[in-house]
Image (cartoon, rainbow, N blue to C red):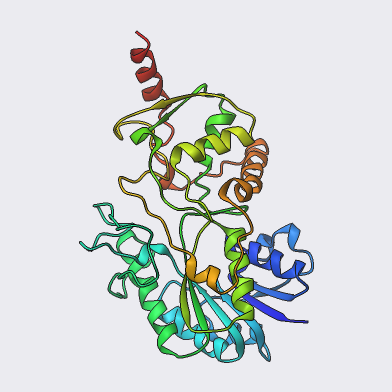
Amino acid sequence: MSKALIIGGTGLIGRATAARLLAAGWEVDVTGRDPARMPGELAGVRFVRAERDDARQLGAALGEGADLVVDCVCYTAAHARLLLPLAADATSTVLISSKAVYVDDLGNHANSDVPPRFDGPIRETQPTLAPLDIDYDSREGYGTNKVAAELVALDSGLPITILRPSRVHGVGAARPREWVLVKRVLDGRRAVLLAGGGSGVVHPTAAANIAALIETVAHVPGSRVLNSADPDAPTALAITRTIARHLGHSWEEVLIPDDTLGRTPWDSPHPVVLDTSAALALGYRPAGSYAETVAAGLDWLVSLARGGADPAAGDPYFDGFFDYAAEDAYLAGASR
């Protein structure tokens, strides 16, 4: 039986990967701080309490080695340096990075004040931010620290694959962007306003598709960088229709020409699409399209809400997405 260790395995990507490997007959261990966060559907997966910054605990979690190590919580060069001894005792290792590392010709990126403008689908050879060691939990530091972590891994010469996903979605998301639309459905909104005519495109990535790519990489070890994204890159309008259709809801689509109202998490003045041909060339096959893979996450959000939970609680990211009063005033004015 093949053995996998998933560092930070109780989160969105970790739980999808653990579920896929478990179904394929792997022995799976996941690390985390709190066993209470262990998803119920992962019966058969062993939880190992370990701090991400504790080399001794991580080493104990690995034990005598593994066929696959997946690091879902590698945010800095220091984290990457702690990963290297584990990778040395593994056949294949995966480090989860982000498309936030990419810059356009003017140096703009996903978290810059000016949105990036890429010349077509982004390949892994696209320039990236300069590596920095600053607060990684910030707009300025997230991408730069990810680059620093990537460089540590790639310079090691070990068989570590870097995955760069975009707008990850699925069951267990800490920031479930689809909630912006699911909440509207549950609130019975009869119209949805869409900034920029709903034409924005920021490529989504299902956790299930990341898991499928990780399983592929497990069997093809190597030192490389791979983009990870859904096989389709739907517009904000298409995503809106997918979510409404899945939840059996109908509403009037009001296309706003500017961004004064109707913002969504997929707004972008220029398309941000990842080229996944390198992953496909390895033999990777997606678990499904956006519509196919997002369904479970939508049902999970509905279940949370009906159980009294607020999926957006405490996250300032969602501030401003639910200004119903402004929307109603716009609709009232438009109807005169």
Quadrant housing the C terminus = top left
Residue 265: x and y in percent read 42, 45
Residue at 41% x, 25% y: name it: 254
As drawn, 236 above or below 331: below
Residue 124: x and y in percent read 40, 70
Relative depth, front residue between 5 and 46: 5
Relative depth, front residue between 69 and 202: 202
Residue 73: x and y in percent read 51, 70
240 left or right of 309 in image: left
Residue at 60% x, 27% y: name it: 249
Relative depth, front residue between 307 and 28: 28
221 left or right of 138 in image: right
Residue 180 visible in the displayed image: no
- Residue 39 sits in quarter: bottom right
25 left or right of 222 in image: right
230 left or right of 273 in image: right
Relative depth, front residue between 213 and 95: 213
As drawn, 18 above or below 53: above
Residue 271 visible in the displayed image: yes
Residue at 56% x, 81% y: name it: 93
- Residue 86 sits in quarter: bottom right
Residue at 30% x, 58% y: name it: 118
